[in-house]
Amino acid sequence: MHLNFLEPLLSVIRPTLSESTLNNLKAVEYQWVRTLYVEGYDSNEINHYIQTCFGGDPTFADLFRRVALDQESIYVLLQHLGCAPSSKEF
């Protein structure tokens, strides 16, 4: 019997947000991150909440937070997820 140990890991690492949500900087998910920041949560806490709620790896959480706070280009986040225009198959 062949067991695929990576399959559960991939489902945990893959973010649950759609590409359209990620592309919408006015999405409630980004607004929520901005609210956490304004309320005084530090970067590590915000990243933890992002991973807990949306999945993804630590890099995704950090990039998502930085995009929400206008500290990083959305293109870098999309590139990390393989959704950026130059990384899509045509």
Image (cartoon, rainbow, N blue to C red):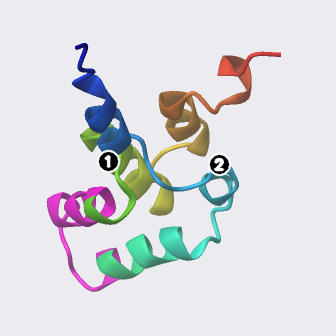
What residue appears at the point 71 percent right and 22 percent down from the top-left corner?
88
Reading the image, the residue beneath label 2 is 19
How far across and how far down the image is residue 73, in percent?
Answer: 56, 43
For the C terminus, the quadrant is top right
What residue appears at the point 50 percent right and 70 percent down from the top-left corner?
29
How far across and how far down the image is residue 87, in percent?
Answer: 65, 19
Q: CA distance from mark 1 to mark 2?
A: 17 Å
Above or below, 84 relative to 64: above
Q: Main secondary structure of the magenta part?
A: helix
Is residue 47 within the magenta segment?
yes
Examine the image and state in which quarter residue 84 appears. top right
What residue appears at the point 43 percent right and 48 percent down from the top-left corner?
15
For mark 1, give the secondary structure: helix
For the N terminus, the quadrant is top left
Residue type at mark 2 is: Glu
**Which residue is farthest front?**
1
Reading the image, the residue beneath label 1 is 62
